[in-house]
Image: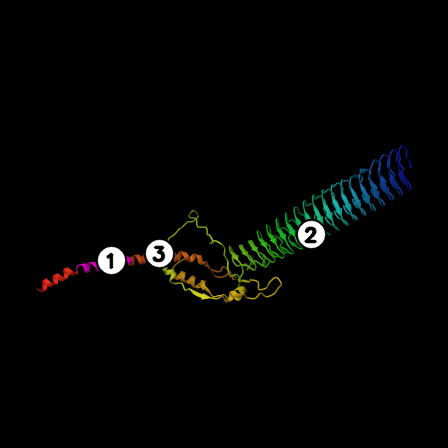
Amino acid sequence: MNTSGGYENTFVGHKAGEHNTTGDFNTGIGSFALQDLTTGYSNLALGAQAMMRATTNFQNCAVGIGAMTFATSGFYNHAFGYHAMFNTASAGIGNHAFGFEALLNNTGAYNCAYGQTSMRANINGNYNAAFGSSALYNNTTGNNNTAMGELALVNNTSGNFNTVYGSRAAYTSMTGNGIVAIGDSALYANVSSGNTAVGSRALRSNSIGLMNTSVGSESLYLNSTGNTNTAIGVNASRNQIIGSNNVAVGAFSLQNNLNNYNTSVGVFSGSVHNNYSYGTFVGYGADASLSGLTNITAVGSGAIAVANNQVKLGNSFVTTIGGAVNWSIISDARFKKDVRNDVAGLDFILELKPVTYKYDILTYRNYTGESKTDINGNVTMLNNKEFIRYSGFLAQEVEQAAVRAGYDFSGVHHPENETDTYMLSYAEFVVPLVKAVQELNSKIELLEKQNSELRSGLLKLQNNKPDMNANISISSK
């Protein structure tokens, strides 16, 4: 051991500190510990070959056989464990390695690796933190990553600014940037960027899908290529593979969706079929009756949209829909064309058959596919609506009345598919009723005119009666 010019050094072991010249405040315990140190200072090496090739290093701590063995330079590093930071020719600055072969090849700076073989392949990646067995194992040049959990971000090589917590979270990710994965196997197959997954196996199958947000166990589980989706809730959008621009909030919401531009809020909302587009579902079990429908809205518990371009409010149990003011319909003349004065009046109105009736709710629910159970699987009972006697028309009869009157009446909705139903827009009856009143008024005016003429003629006859009587008297003489 050569200690010329150095002081406050402690070297214990075969060839420990052998080449030290002016290094100070060093402690090397173990065979070959700090063997090549010359001018380095304030280093602690405990274990055979610990910091063996260090020369000018300072303020490093290496504990374990072969810890920082080939680190010829570097400072503010800590290596604890067998072969921790073993092959680091330049140990870098401010690195912390705890565990078997943690940061084995590191030359980067300000990395923290806790766990056996964590960040084992890191070369010059900086500002990374790995906690767990083999976490960030293959990282080489990636920066600013945080991985916590066994095999978390294990295959990341050059991805940056990733945050991963959970066993095997973001397992496949190699070059993705800006991902957040919290939960076991969250974003397991991910190779893209900008995704956030929180929950066990959330976004597990995502490969190249971008900018997705998944919160809840197995939410967006099968998503592979879909982009900019948001799923919040257990199994939300679970079976979606390719859909994009969807929002699912609530357990099992949109769980089978494969299409785009849908918004679903509520447990089991939009969950029955798999091919909606531009759909909006709000409420427990709000859905559509068929796959493939587009531009549909169902609002309310169990509300079911049954045709394209339809808004359905409430389920079959609803008895009142209202508010403080009337519903307003856009009726601006600037946005109307091909205006015609061909509304049928009395010819149509007189064909109508007003009736009273009761709803057969059970048949309706079976026909449209409306859920017959509640959230607990209990069969929902019928309510008082079945016993209410309503006044109105039968849509099929109204349709035939319009045909007989030669009137293209827009107040009848004809079914578009096998689950759609006839519907009436009662507000549109106002138009032919107005026309009928106008026609009646014309008849009344004509009758009044005729009546006036008759009254006038009768009055003239009455006024001429004395003259007629006088003429009769003269004639009789």
Q: What stretch is highlighted in magenta?
A: 448-464
Q: How far apart are marks 3 and 2 (CA)?
A: 70 Å
Residue 289, image quadrant:
bottom right
Regarding mark 2 in the picture, which secondary structure is present there?
loop
Q: Mark 2 points at which residue?
A: 186
Is residue 462 inside the magenta stretch?
yes
**Left or right side of 315 for 394:** left
Query: For the N terminus, which image quadrant?
Result: top right
Q: Position of residue 77 (x, y in %)?
A: 80, 40
**Left or right side of 76 for 169:** left
Q: Distance between the residues labelled 2 and 1?
A: 92 Å
Q: Name the residue under label 3.
A: 438
Q: Can residue 410 be seen in the rendering of this structure?
A: no
User: Hey, what amino acid is under mark 2?
Assistant: Ala
Tell me the residue at 61%/61% (across/down): 375
Regarding mark 1 in the picture, which secondary structure is present there?
helix
For residue 453, which numbered disc appears in the image? 1
N-terminal label among 2 and 1: 2
Outermost residue, top side: 5
